[in-house]
């Protein structure tokens, strides 16, 4: 599931005038995903039919990829080695990842489909899979016979080598529903650039400012790309949007940094940015040419990671003194940021520690700590209903609401070799 999400834009009223205004807060049922016999596990991704993939420790103290489907956790096994690690799944329940191979010290990428794990093969040694679309096309990287990493696309049972660029290592990172691929080019010495592969052609993506540190992050179905880059000669990290051959610097909140994490099919982007003379990160939305701060749960810093088609944003925020400081996950919807731990009901046995993914139904894959056992477990938060809550008169929210669209993706994916 790459960046194929289409956001239904919900703009806030130009003025929110009274304290009688209400928002419908989401409410979640907690579903433990179980385990494969061990006491450790975490989710990675959730698809739009509610299936979840992740990693769980077995009774033999090995980590295996799992698929949670129809109320059961399924052990996906390995390619003969001891362990396997998932990366993503599509709406057909096909899971990709990597596994140790029997009798060797190498990783191979796999696709799990129809109750069977298939080795994607490798012209060299190690192979990595990083993204899959709903057509079952996979992109990633493999170590070729020239001892360089080559980006590839796997489709209909065949792996196609996308090659290197000017002899430098390449790695495929995201693939959209049209088969367009973004990836990164490792130039060595800590330098890297990014590419877009479209209809068999490799396009070198240039940043708006001179830079040899460019990392592509996501692509939507219109072929719009977001990437993060460091301006040469300056300690400034910015993000840019590549669209129809042009690049647009997303700017900052006045500070030196912006990091974009996701783009939807409407071209809206979420991530973090800094204010003037501060290194603190703040959750932001880029929409209609403007970078908008989303606020926090009372603390200083916040991070926006993901968004679904309904405009529900998933992230984390520091808490203020009134809530014991610390960090808690949030869901941002209808212009309001909610603490996820306050949407589980007062009798919940769980404390949500970390969030991983959200689907189009509003269901969320998380890790939570059981208040009774103290164990951290993979959980599915299933959107159950809404609770209507009064909204206090919002001076700043009214200003924020002009043209604001609620939004989204850092699926906690395994980082690829391109950042080496």
Image (cartoon, rainbow, N blue to C red):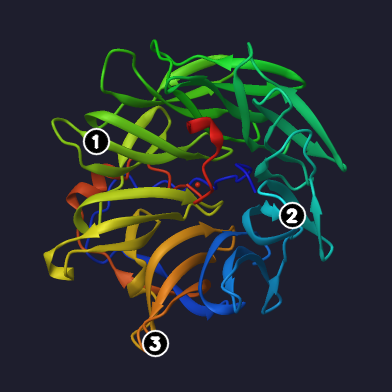
Q: Is residue 47 left or right of residue 201?
A: left
Mark 2, secondary structure of its residue: loop
Image vertical order of residue 191 relative to residue 159, above or below? above
Q: Residues within 10 Å of mark 3 (few under 14, many from 20)?
A: few
Q: Are marks 1 and 3 in contact (CB under 8 Å)?
A: no
**Front residue (pair 402, 130):** 130
Mark 1, secondary structure of its residue: strand
- What residue does disc 3 label? 373
- What residue does disc 2 label? 103
Q: Earlier in the sequence, mark 1 or mark 3?
A: 1
Q: Is residue 136 visible?
A: yes
Say which of marks 3 and 2 sits in front: 2
**Front residue (pair 115, 323):** 115
Per the model, the C-alpha gap separating discs 1 and 3 is 39 Å
Q: Earlier in the sequence, mark 3 or mark 2?
A: 2
Q: Residues within 10 Å of mark 2 (few under 14, many from 20)?
A: few
Per the model, the C-alpha gap separating discs 3 and 2 is 38 Å
**Front residue (pair 73, 298):** 73
Residue displayed at 47% across by 66% down: 366
Residue displayed at 82% across by 66% down: 115
Q: Is residue 34 visible?
A: no
Image coordinates of residue 9 in percent, x first then y, are 50, 45
Total number of numbered discs in the rendering = 3
Say which of marks 1 and 2 sits in front: 2
Q: Earlier in the sequence, mark 1 or mark 2?
A: 2
- What residue does disc 1 label? 274
């Amino acid at each position: 599931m790459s960046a194929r999400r289409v956001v239904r834009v919900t703009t806030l009223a130009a003025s929110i005038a009274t304290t009688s205004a209400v928002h419908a807060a989401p409410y979640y049922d907690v579903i433990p995903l179980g385990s494969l016999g061990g006491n450790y596990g975490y989710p990675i991704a959730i698809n739009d039919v509610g299936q979840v993939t992740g990693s769980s420790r077995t009774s033999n103290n090995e980590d295996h990829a799992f698929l949670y489907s129809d109320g059961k956790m399924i052990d996906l096994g390995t390619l003969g080695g001891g362990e396997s690690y998932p990366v993503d799944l599509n709406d057909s329940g096909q899971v990709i990842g990597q596994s140790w191979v029997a009798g060797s010290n190498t990783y191979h990428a796999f696709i799990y489909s129809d109750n069977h794990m298939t080795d994607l093969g490798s012209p060299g040694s190690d192979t990595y899979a990083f993204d899959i679309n709903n057509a079952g096309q996979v992109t990633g990287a493999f170590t070729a016979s020239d001892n360089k990493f080559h980006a590839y696309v796997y489709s209909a049972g065949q792996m196609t080598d996308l090659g290197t660029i000017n002899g430098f290592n390449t790695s495929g990172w995201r693939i959209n529903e049209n088969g367009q691929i973004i990836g990164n080019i490792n130039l060595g010495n800590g330098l890297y650039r990014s590419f877009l592969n479209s209809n068999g052609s490799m396009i070198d993506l240039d940043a708006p400012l001179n830079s040899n540190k460019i990392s592509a992050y996501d692509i939507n179905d219109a072929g719009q790309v977001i990437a993060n880059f460091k301006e040469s000669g300056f300690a400034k990290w910015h993000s840019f949007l590549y669209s129809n051959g042009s690049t647009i610097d997303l700017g900052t909140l006045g500070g030196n940094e912006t990091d974009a994490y996701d783009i939807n099919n409407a071209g809206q982007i979420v991530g973090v940015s800094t204010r003037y003379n501060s290194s603190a990160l703040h959750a932001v939305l880029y929409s209609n040419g403007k970078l908008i701060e989303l606020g926090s749960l009372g603390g200083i810093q916040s991070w926006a990671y993901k968004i679904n088609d309904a405009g529900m944003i998933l992230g984390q925020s520091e808490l203020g003194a009134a809530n014991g400081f610390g960090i808690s996950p949030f869901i941002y919807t209808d212009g309001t940021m909610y603490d996820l731990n306050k949407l589980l009901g007062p009798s919940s046995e769980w404390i949500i520690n970390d969030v991983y993914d959200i689907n189009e139904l509003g269901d969320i894959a998380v890790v939570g700590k059981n208040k009774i056992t103290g164990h951290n477990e993979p959980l599915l938060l299933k959107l159950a209903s809404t609770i209507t809550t009064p909204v206090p008169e919002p001076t700043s929210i009214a200003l924020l609401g002009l043209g604001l669209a609620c939004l989204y993706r850092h699926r906690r994916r395994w980082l690829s070799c391109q950042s080496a």
